Amino acid sequence: MFFEAAMRHRNFTEAAEELFVTQAAVSKRVRQLEDWLGARLFEREGRKLWPTDAGLYLAEKTGATLDFLDQALRAIKAEQRSLVRIASVTTLAAFWLQPKLRDFALSDEACLFNLITADEIGDLLRPGHDLVVLHGDGRFPGWRCELLFQEVVVPVGTPQVIEALDDAKSLNRPPLLSYPRLAPNWIDWQGWMQGTGSQTFRDWPSRHCASYNQSIGRALKGQGVALGTVPLLQEEMSSGQLVSLDGGTLATGRGYYLAWPETQSLSLEAERLKSVLLGSN
């Protein structure tokens, strides 16, 4: 390494700066190599180095050897540490994707992956992502996709809260937990009432939440009624922590999709992760 750097720079000081050592260290190591070979590799002229015939011969062989070594190291590193970059809408990542990724990481199929969450479509469809989980109608130009599940929205709450909804005369009505619509196709309470034709909650109090995730968290604490996407809340609903309102189901016609670039071949690791996610439904 010392000789090769000195040969490229033709200067011990510049070689030392590249290798993060002192100029004296580079000069000493080259001198030791010359003593061991019994041949001079450089002619010194001030700070300038002029390679001898022996130096040029050794540089040629050393360069080829380092090239082969670099190729071998890169091949091994790429094979053993290929990273799959997966991006997802925040809601699905929190309730559905992260548990799946944890199971994948503990399995024999595991590989390195990096999860990125966002809600802006532009952030999700940036170049560099191998797999992307998207919400929509399945039409994403430049991307192939397969449906994970259809979106089905229903009011949810703890059993006690949902039971209280049957008491139409109660003055202590639990609030409707609302959150900002970050995309035009997100369903809020107004959209749910329009889609179902129900006016049950038209005059009910509401409580603002910072996000969909927070609305579900407050619903789990019995602090109101949230709009839940059924496939995302399988664990909470199967355990009885949350129950749905009878007759309040709204199929939006949209869904959650796993997508990947049309023009990009997926790595073996990305293909494994894709198969696991598509097969988990």
Image (cartoon, rainbow, N blue to C red):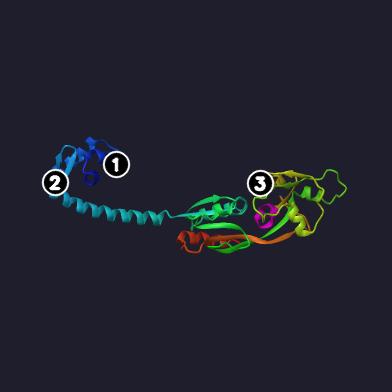
Q: Which secondary structure lies at badge 2?
A: helix
Measuring from the top left, give residue 212's x and y in whole percent.
67, 49
| CB contact under 8 Å: marks 2 and 1 | no
Measuring from the top left, give residue 193's x and y in whole percent.
77, 55
Residues in magenta, as a range: 228-238
| CB contact under 8 Å: marks 3 and 2 | no
Circle 3: residue type: Ser
Which badge, 3 or 2, is on the more N-terminal residue? Answer: 2
Mark 3 highlights which residue? 211
What is the C-alpha distance between the residues marked 2 and 1?
25 Å
Which badge, 2 or 1, is on the more N-terminal residue? Answer: 1
Circle 1: residue type: Glu
What is the C-alpha distance between the residues marked 1 and 3?
50 Å
Q: Which secondary structure lies at badge 1?
A: helix
- The residue carrying pointer 2 sits among few (fewer than 14), some (14 to 19) or many (20 or more) residues within 10 Å by Cα, namely few
Query: Magenta span has 98?
Result: no
Q: Horizontal placement of 202 versus 21: left or right?
A: right
Mark 1 highlights which residue? 18
* Between 187 and 109, the one nearer to me in the picture: 187
State the image quarter where residue 13 is shown.
top left
Which badge, 1 or 3, is on the more N-terminal residue? Answer: 1
Q: Horizontal placement of 185 versus 51: left or right?
A: right
